[in-house]
Image: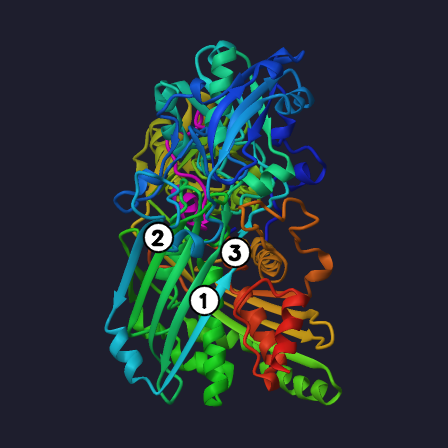
């Protein structure tokens, strides 16, 4: 069962349009909500007059700051430096607005059309303040403080030190100095955010939230005190989700405002974000700048890296806003030996939408920087790009390998893996030598073809724990509930295969249900490529407990010692008698639960190769072929692995070549629609070949590694390397994204 490409459970339901997303939720008496958002990036709020809006037929209420408790603040979800609490975001603007799109008021009406019309009837007095729309502006001498109680717009400087980078850089035979920038981006999932809040007056005792996804138990523990409810008085249910990508499941102002409105009115309230709101209000991500130096010896081996990173946090530190840049700083050495490393990470607030996590937070940024520097060094030293990576990759006999960095108090230690073998597998599948030979043939015909490589490490299986509950039913089916959430990649199928492997039953015998705090009392959720690792091991443990309980009950039923009871494919036998799991469940409930505590993070080696052509007359980059692979520890379902890696490649292509959220100097978003914020289409994605490596992880009983974030974070480095390789005679250096034709053409023209 584990290792077979089982058909995806529930796929027919989604493919046939029978999914239940937030927009599909209908509750009797349900009202609709719309948010009035600031049109200024930085302003002092004066009088808010909602009288005309309240007079509009169908409007039930308008909530402003006076209706929202002061304690309604979005907290950090991860450990944060001292003083960070001063930069947290209230659920609704109080006295000052700090970004375009910040909630000022909430309108609740009979339908969304009336609610949106009412927004235009609310009069707000603004007193504009000076705007810091960039990190440079926020750090400039005399810059206005976004938060008056602070002495700087720099929230914290996080320092990482390994060895003596200053000395090593000074003594290195080759030092490359460069500045890299990564653009601001967002998840832009198929389905925008949404939430339905059903008050206790309707449910008969609990406030029920539908649609709060990814981390329902964490969000419940944050929200219950705000609403002055016991934890048991708040129920969160996950419905179908059109993609998570990190942004879903973080706590947002609407997750507080909508339930407050439902409690105030005693009626269900629904909020569905439109696409413009999504681009403006859903977490942004990625934007940062590296000023970096890397030193090499004469043989192309890395001796040191020294970097200063400026991360643009947007207007507030929201939920997990500090995670991406710190993860990226900790993993900047990647899969390579870097004996000396120094990094100063500045986290700066600006008058833009707050940032949060986005698929593989921090890693596309650091991989872009490191992999570009490796190719630059290879060109300077006359070494093939594949060879310079061979010389620097950490070898399997060096595992476990502590790279020396720390993020959120945890040392970065690779437990196992074989990075060199992964690179060789990538080169073999690409047929690297043949690809280089073809490159030369095409060059003679005037075709500029480039080959780009990237090898990187993914952080997977994040803790602290996850839960699973199994129940055998009288009809022979088995229900699986878990605290992990389903974001679309096929968690249901994976868990059915893992439990099915343990119980000797086919995957179709299992009903894996979406997370619900009413069904699973405790859990953590899905983020950081953790679902398969954590929930999979918890489900495997629960299956063992189910078998143990079934054997005990069968032994009692048969009147034999427990060690005489044999089990196979759902049937227990002893001395010629047998009983099924279903029969035992019919007699008395047969249900167990288990929790898997994560001892440490599991790291996955990954690699990608890109073949691309560049048109020097237009700057157009055409991707011809991509090969991508990852160490999954142990493959549960090869078909899902292929889907995840291929989908990740498409995501990475968008991040690298198309996506960029732009602001003007006044903090106004210039890319507020999909006409301006471009996403990859079918013709952007070339043939993709995926493969996987199996080196068992040492951090969990099943030896699993996560996969959800392995496909995308190497694309920025590999595509940029391919473009520079195609234009190597121009000594072109790509240091900024996205790789639009205009940017590539400008770089070509500058070199010519």
Mark number, residue 456: 1
Q: Is residue 512 magenta?
A: no
Residues shaded magenta: 516-538
What residue is shown with label 2? 700
Task: Tell us which disc is closer to us: 1 or 2.
Answer: 1
* Labels 1 and 3 touching (C-beta < 8 A): no
- Alpha carbon separation for disc pair 1 and 3: 25 Å
Side of 151 relative to 251 (left or right): left
Element at label 1:
strand
Please tell me which residue lies in front, 649 or 406.
406
- Alpha carbon separation for disc pair 2 and 3: 17 Å
What residue is shown with label 3? 3
Q: On screen, 540 above or below 742?
A: above
Q: On screen, 396 above or below 508?
A: below
Report crowding for label 1: few under 14, some 14 to 19, many 20 or more residues within 10 A (C-alpha). many
Report crowding for label 2: few under 14, some 14 to 19, many 20 or more residues within 10 A (C-alpha). many
Q: Is residue 517 magenta?
A: yes
- Alpha carbon separation for disc pair 1 and 2: 22 Å
Q: Which residue lies at the image location 66% right of the left edge and 45% below the top edge?
A: 673
């Amino acid at each position: 069962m584990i290792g077979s490409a089982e058909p995806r459970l529930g796929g027919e339901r989604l493919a046939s349009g029978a999914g239940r997303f937030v927009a599909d939720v209908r509750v009797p008496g349900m009202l609709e909500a719309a948010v009035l958002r600031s049109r200024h990036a930085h302003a002092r709020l004066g009088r808010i007059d909602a009288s005309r809006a309240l007079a509009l037929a169908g409007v039930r209420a308008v909530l402003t700051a006076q209706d929202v408790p002061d304690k309604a603040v979005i907290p950090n979800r991860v450990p944060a430096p001292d003083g960070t609490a001063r930069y947290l975001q209230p659920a609704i603007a109080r006295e000052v607005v700090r970004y375009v799109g910040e909630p000022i008021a909430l309108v609740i009406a009979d339908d969304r059309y009336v609610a949106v019309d009412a927004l235009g009837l609310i009069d707000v007095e603004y007193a504009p303040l000076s705007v810091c729309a960039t990190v440079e502006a926020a750090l400039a001498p005399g810059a206005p403080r976004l938060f008056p109680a602070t002495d700087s717009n720099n929230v914290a400087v996080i320092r990482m030190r390994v060895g003596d980078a200053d000395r090593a850089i000074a003594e290195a035979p080759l030092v490359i100095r460069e500045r890299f920038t990564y653009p601001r981006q967002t998840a832009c999932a198929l389905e925008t955010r949404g939430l339905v809040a059903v008050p206790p007056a309707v449910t008969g005792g609990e406030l029920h939230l539908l649609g709060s996804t990814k981390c329902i138990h964490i969000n419940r523990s944050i929200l219950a005190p705000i609403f002055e409810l016991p934890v048991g008085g708040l129920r969160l249910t996950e419905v179908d989700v059109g993609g998570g990508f990190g942004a879903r499941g973080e706590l947002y102002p609407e997750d507080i405002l909508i339930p407050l409105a439902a409690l105030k009115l005693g009626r269900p309230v629904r909020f569905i974000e439109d696409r413009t709101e999504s681009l403006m209000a859903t977490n942004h991500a990625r934007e940062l700048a590296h000023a970096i130096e890397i030193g090499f010896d004469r043989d192309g081996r890395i001796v040191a890296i020294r970097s200063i990173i400026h991360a643009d946090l947007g207007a507030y530190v929201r939920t997990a806003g500090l995670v991406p840049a710190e993860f990226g700083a900790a993993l900047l050495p990647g899969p390579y030996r870097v004996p000396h490393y120094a990094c100063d990470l500045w986290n700066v607030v600006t008058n833009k939408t707050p940032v949060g996590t986005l698929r593989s937070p921090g890693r596309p940024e650091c991989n872009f920087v490191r992999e570009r520097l490796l190719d630059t060094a290879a060109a300077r030293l006359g070494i093939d790009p594949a060879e310079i990576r061979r010389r620097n990759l950490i070898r399997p006999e060096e595992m476990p390998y502590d790279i020396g960095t720390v993020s959120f108090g945890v040392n970065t230690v690779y437990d196992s893996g074989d990075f060199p073998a992964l690179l060789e597998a990538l080169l073999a599948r690409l047929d690297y030598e043949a690809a280089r030979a073809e490159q030369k043939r095409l060059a003679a015909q005037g075709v500029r073809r480039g080959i780009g490589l990237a090898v990187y490490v993914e952080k997977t299986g994040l803790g602290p724990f996850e839960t699973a509950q199994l129940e055998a039913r009288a009809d022979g089916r088995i229900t699986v509930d878990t605290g992990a959430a389903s974001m679309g990649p096929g968690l249901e199928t994976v868990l059915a295969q893992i439990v099915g492997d343990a119980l000797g039953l086919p995957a179709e015998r299992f009903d894996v249900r979406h997370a619900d705090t009413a069904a699973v009392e405790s859990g953590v959720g899905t983020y950081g490529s953790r679902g398969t690792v954590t929930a999979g091991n918890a489900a495997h443990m629960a299956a063992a407990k189910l078998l143990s309980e079934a054997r005990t009950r069968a032994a009692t039923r048969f009147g034999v010692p427990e060690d005489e009871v044999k089990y196979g494919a759902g049937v227990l036998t002893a001395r010629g008698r047998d009983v099924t799991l279903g029969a035992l469940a019919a007699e008395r409930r047969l249900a167990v639960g288990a929790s898997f505590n994560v001892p440490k993070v599991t790291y996955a080696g990954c690699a990608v190769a890109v073949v691309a052509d560049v048109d020097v007359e237009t700057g157009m980059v055409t991707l011809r072929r991509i090969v991508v692979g990852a160490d999954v520890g142990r493959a549960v379902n090869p078909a899902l692995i292929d889907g995840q890696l291929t989908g990740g490649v498409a995501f990475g292509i968008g991040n690298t070549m198309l996506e960029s959220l732009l602001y003007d100097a006044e903090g106004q978003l210039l890319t507020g629609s999909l006409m301006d914020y471009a996403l990859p289409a079918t013709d952007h994605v070339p043939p993709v070949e995926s493969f996987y490596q199996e080196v068992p992880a040492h951090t969990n009983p099943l030896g699993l590694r996560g996969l959800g974030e392995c496909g995308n974070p190497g694309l920025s480095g590999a595509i940029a390397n391919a473009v520079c390789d195609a234009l190597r005679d121009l000594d072109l250096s790509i240091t900024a994204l996205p790789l639009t034709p205009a940017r590539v053409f400008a770089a070509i023209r500058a070199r010519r």
